[in-house]
Image: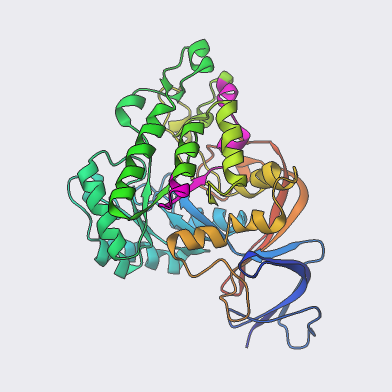
Amino acid sequence: MAKLLIKSGRYINPKTNTDENLDVLVSDGKIVELKKEINSNGATQIIDAKNLWVVPGLIDIHCHLRDPGQPEKETIETGTRAAASGGFTSICPMANTIPPVDTAALVEYVNKTNQKFGSVNIFQIAAVSKGLMQEELSPFEELKGAGAVGFSDDGKPIENLKLLRHALEYAQMLDANIISHAEDSRLCCGGAVHEGHWSIKLGIPGIPSSSEAVCVAREIELVRQTKGKIHFAHISTKEAVELIRKAKADGLNVTAEVTPHHLVLTDEDVQDFNPNKKMNPPLRSKEDQIALIKGVLDGTLDTFATDHAPHTFEEKSRSILEAPFGIIGFETALPLYLEVFYHTKKLSPLDFVKKLTVNPASVLGIKRGSISVGDVADITILNPNLDWTYDVSSSFSKSRNSPFHMRHMKGKAAYTIVNGHVVSKN
């Protein structure tokens, strides 16, 4: 019986509101004992976690693996290795692959490929509409039966509101979530950066805040009508935060996420015309950034997410107007969130860890996010104070499209443990 003993760590489990120094014993992929002092006899592996946090395995509720269809950008093997290096034990890839994940067979393809080549758990998000064409709903029940944990046409908004209404109703019957890419494509058409002072000064077509806010507003009204539930991906604007806050106050089943780049960068940072600072939604204003941080602190924004979106060097070598939207983020998300919320003492360790574990697990109904006795041993051991510099050339991802190359970071995953096995050690 393989046993793993984690000694002397700061055990932080938001599910039980526990933050204390405990040893953790793992056997056959499960947590079997939690005590102040556990004898090391019989342990096949011992990890000294002194001065480290021992937390539930981190969950990334929103990412892109480009598999099937674009192996030159990322594969399940390379993407999950990058996720493991970043401290994530479970990730939720979106359905906008080639072809889109809109059949049970494609969900099974992802799961079987991950079983063979992957490093972490994959909880697949399936397409809302067949082929992402927004004309006909995908077979939700069949997709959920194959293992899909939610439905999204992320990458493009659902502008057929009749279809979205039916999707909310259908998903409600399955107790599943619709994940919204909130954007009005006509308002943002042709834009590359946030519409504001810097887009005007730099002469770059802008994407207005209203493109996000009007979409959030109309989708909230559909939730009000259907009594369904919706999760808003990558929220970036002050107006959207206020709308979601009001919807929650009204008792609607609405949740939302925020990404690290929108918390540490603003539209002012695009002055260098770096295409690796082009993402969708775009980097917004300082005022928006402040609203996002406030939204995290008051619970309006429930979860953190990476929106890891790999692209080839050739694609991202184009001008900021021509390059595709998106950046990689698995390996930089944790330290950037620590920078904004922990090192500034805005969130306690318990509340910080909650945004990456219990909350995303709750949003999608994933049976992860806790490390109590009997739970699956998905564990992240992290050093919140480790000083290091991110070198994108050493990333496990196939792609290199990060705006954070050579940025000083503070905090890193030391060990990533999936089902009781160490899959990454930094």
**Image position of 57 (left or right of 54):** left
Q: Tell me, yes or no, if residue 6 can be seen here.
A: no
**Where does residue 195 sit, x and y in percent of width and height?**
46, 20
Residue occupying the point 35% across, 63% down: 148
**Residue 110 shown in magenta:** no
* Residue 268 shown in magenta: yes
- Say how many tags the image has: 0
Instruction: Name the quarter where the N terminus is drawn.
Output: bottom right
Residue name at image x 23 percent, y 56 percent: 138
Image quarter where the C terminus lies is bottom right
User: Which residues are the magenta region?
Assistant: 247-270
Q: Nearer the viewer, residue 351 or 397?
A: 351
Pick whichever, 282 or 4, lies toward us.
Answer: 282
Residue 280 position, x and y percent, is: 44, 34
Q: For residue 420, which quarter of the picture?
A: bottom right
The reply, left or right, for residue 265 in relation to residue 80 is right
Which percent across, then down, holds residue 253? 41, 54
Residue at 26% over, 57% down:
169
Residue 396 lies left or right of residue 317; in this view the side is: right
In this view, the residue in front, 163 or 312, is: 163
